[in-house]
Amino acid sequence: MDRAPTDPGRCVLLAEEAWGTALHAARSVAANGGETVVVTAGDGAAVFRRSRWCDHAVDIRTTDPAEFRDGLRQWVASRLPGDDPVAVIPLSDRHLEWLVEGRAEFGERFRLSIPGDDVARNLLDKDRQFGLAERSGCPPPRWVTVRRQSDLERLGSLTGPVVVRPTGWDTSGEHYFKLVVVDDESAVESEVAARLRSGAELIVQEFVDEPPDAVEFAIVWRSRTSGRTEICTGRKLEQSGRRGGVMAMGESTVLPDVADAARRFVDETGFVGLGGLEVIRSAGSLRFIEFNPRLEAIHFLASRAGVDTVAMEYLDLLGRAVPRSEPQVPSTGWVGSAWVQRLVDDRSSWRDALRARARFARSPNRVRAVWSGSDPRPGLAVTTRVLGRAFRHERGGRT
């Protein structure tokens, strides 16, 4: 892929260590002639500097939201002088919330890829998000929100295995986690109580036991200038854990009912911008899992399928015409870091990994989360980091 000959503007991507998300987003911006900056709140710029599609990469080493926003504005003023508009796209819930909190601090030059304040706050809280999903006609499995000890008595309304997850990106307490499945009903209250004592606020939800390919998704973009909506649908084929987790392999495929569920949800919530819906197909119906109100990590599948939502958002933020996308085509995606995590957690998964790798090799229109033949250096850097962590984890387990 070569850069477009025109230069419609600049784009800042606010990234975490979801390497593929930012790298593919940078490639989408570069294909439209844009100058791309990747900013991380931590230690990630070294990887992004290796990409031919990133013009600049910088670490702003702070977890203080106001300090991060101030550092971002100062960096743009010093390194991207002038009055040309700058699109700012957050790639995580944390960065999304930081931008929403400080929206008034950014002048007209900054075009922030965030929904309205109330919309963002509703969608960053899983309890509110689940209520909106019910009203949109795609109900989640039964859930209980537990924010204090007195809420524990409500757990009796749930039966069977449950999923425990934080209500938001910053409510997991002292020990960060995304979700845990508790099979033993008698252990649910003690598990939840222990996490409450660590400062967590939790969603406890009935666990829907279905194979990985029952988990389906919609990569969504809705224009803030025209109300136009573009959607690419697909399904997970493998996950980072046997009973859930991030996508390890997936495919884009046309799923009309999932697309309809996504449209109803963004209509109900008033959402605009980049997002991603996840549902699970069970007993012939769709059950809501979550909606990410920012760029979905697996957006590269949509881009490969011909629905480049990042390019759409970038052009829309700058007030440019957004070309119509072609109907989506099949694509298959591979996330190597998710497989490493699965193998670290469960060594017996190596057979699953080999079978999945063979299936991926036979699939048409393949795309990897990080690796790219036209941009190999970031992949080498990420592989070194991931394998180093796995080695340290292994050594730690033996001591």
Image: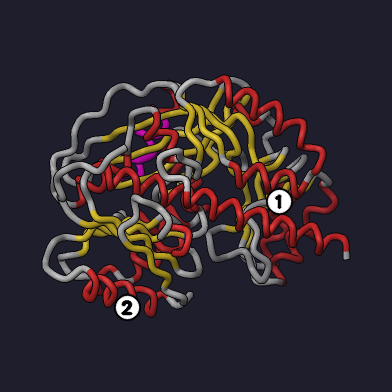
The image quarter containing residue 208 is top right
Chain part drawn in magenta = 261-272
Residue bearing mark 2: 70
Label ID, residue 65: none
Residue in front for this viewpoint, 172 or 392: 392
Task: Give the amino acid at mark 1.
Answer: Val
Reply above or below: 143 against 308: below
Say left or right for 352 vs 227: right
- Numbered disc total: 2
x, y (%) of residue 264? 36, 34
Pick out the residue farthest to the left.
Answer: 83
User: Which residue corresponds to the image point at 53% horizontal and 59% vertical from the top-left?
Assistant: 168
Reply above or below: 286 against 276: above
Find out whether residue 266 is within the magenta segment: yes
Residue in front for this viewpoint, 194 or 57: 57
Q: CA distance from mark 2 to mark 1?
A: 36 Å
Residue bearing mark 1: 180
Say left or right for 337 vs 18: right
x, y (%) of residue 154? 69, 54
Q: Quadrant of the C terminus?
A: bottom right
User: Which residue corresponds to the image point at 40% horizontal and 45% vertical from the top-left?
Assistant: 24
**Residue 116 in view (yes/no):** no
Task: Give the amino acid at mark 2.
Answer: Asp
The image quarter containing residue 177 is bottom right
Residue in front for this viewpoint, 182 or 254: 254
Residue in front for this viewpoint, 130 or 111: 111
Instruction: Characterize the local packing of mark 2: few (<14), some (14-19) or many (20 or more) Cα atoms within 10 angstroms.
Output: some
Reply above or below: 16 against 71: above
Say left or right for 344 vs 308: right
Find out whether residue 386 is within the magenta segment: no
Sequence order check, earlier mark of 2 and 1: 2
User: Which residue corresponds to the image point at 63% horizontal and 51% vertical from the top-left?
Assistant: 144
